[in-house]
Every structure is written in structure tokens, then in C-alpha cells.
Image (cartoon, helix red, strand yellow):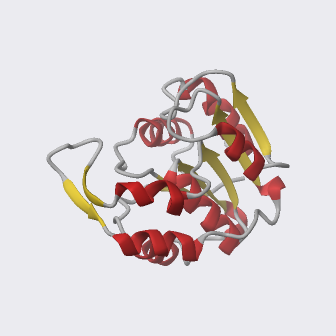
Amino acid sequence: MTTHLLYLHGFRSSPRSFKAQRVGAWLAAHRPEVHVWCPQLPPSPRQAMDEVMAGIAAWPVDGMAVVGSSLGGFYATVVAERTGCRAVVLNPAVDPARDLARHIGEQTAWHDPQERFYFRPEFVDELRAMAPAAITRPERYAAVIAKGDELLDWREMHARYAGAQVRLLDGSDHGLTDFDDHLPFVLHFLQLNP
């Protein structure tokens, strides 16, 4: 049973992400005893991972889990590989160093276009340096992967999480706008559903 849940948002996103809000609202209503943390991740992957690992350092590994979307799915995989906890990845970035190399420069935040940040060239190297070589225990993972993802290749995601519990969607999109349909799958894997 999950007692501590970490939610990691994607690139240009924030704790205000639709999926983060839905997970948080469900837990507040049905499992208020679960400790939930959805930090605002800094643009530097190394800094983001340092802050996350420091924030969960005292969490019980057997009671903790991580959910991550897109770039957050990559980060969730890094956390799961480092700690041994369970992870749910939602349209996870498989090779963000490759994919984000074309986004170097000034970026706007998805939930507040007034908010800007600079994605620096060295951040690509930081992503490359932290990438796990492989998923060591696929049974610790669940993945929601949309064939309709307009940003990431579903085949690459599916191959990366081979052996995990995979919910492969025929349509949907990168943001999983139909996330409410998949929340029960996420909660069941995390042993949180009533």
C-alpha cells in the first residue's frame, strides 16, 4: 500500500497540471492519510533530481511510489531505479536528451505563459548523464501509453517499458485529456483504490 506519493510533472509544466490535480484531488477525497508531494521542478535536470531525492530521503521505500508524466515519467524512472520504489509513467519521455536538444533557449511555462525560463545546452548533458541504462525490474512499473501521442513515439515508450503493466490506448493524446478514464488503473497499481 502506498503511504507516500511523489508526482513529477513534465517539461514546461507545473504542479497545476491537470493530471497532478486529479491525482491530488482524488487522494484528498478518498485517502487523505497519504502524503502527496508534487514539487515545481527547476529547468536543470540535475538540480531537479537533487531536490527530489533530498525531499524523499526520509520516505519509507516500501510505502512510497512515484507518478510521472512525459519528462516527469523519465524522472520517475530515475527515482524508481535509484530507490527501488514503484512507478507509474504517463506517456513517458524515453530519450529526453535527444528530444529536448531542439528546445534549447527561452521557454514559456505551460500554465502561465508570462513565466519564462531558459533551457540551457548543459541540461541536455545532465539528462544524458542520469538516464538509466535499462529498467531493472519491470514489474515495479505501470505505464499509460497513448498511440495518439503527438509528441512522443508510442512504440519507443512501449519497448522501453516491456514487461511492465502497460495500458496501451488506441487514441488519446500526449496530455492524456481522457486521464479520468485511466485513473482507476493508476490507483489499482499503487494499491490505493477503495
Residue 127: x and y in percent read 51, 69
Name the image quarter holding the C terminus. top right
Q: Position of residue 151 (x, y in %)?
A: 50, 38
Q: Does residue 22 appear anywhere in the picture?
A: yes
Residue at image location 36% in from the left, 48% down from the top: 13
- Res. 135 image quadrant: bottom right
Residue for point 57% across, 53% down = 73
Q: Is residue 194 visible?
A: no
Q: Residue at x 48, y 26 (%)?
A: 177
Q: Is residue 139 left or right of residue 151?
A: right
**Does residue 45 sit above or below 176 in this rendering?**
below
Q: Residue at x 85, y 49 (%)?
A: 163
Up/down of 64 relative to 53, above or below: above
Give the total of numbered labels: 0
Report which quarter residue 45 is drawn in: bottom left
Outermost residue, front side: 102
x, y (%) of residue 30? 55, 36
The reply, left or right, for residue 134 in relation to residue 192 is right
Residue 27 in picture, x, y percent from top left: 52, 41
The residue lying toward the viewer, choosing from 145 and 88, is 145
Q: Nearer the viewer, residue 57 or 13?
A: 13
Q: Is residue 30 above or below residue 46?
A: above
Decide which of 6, 192 is in the foreground and name it.
Answer: 6
Left/right placement of residue 11 relative to residue 71 reads left
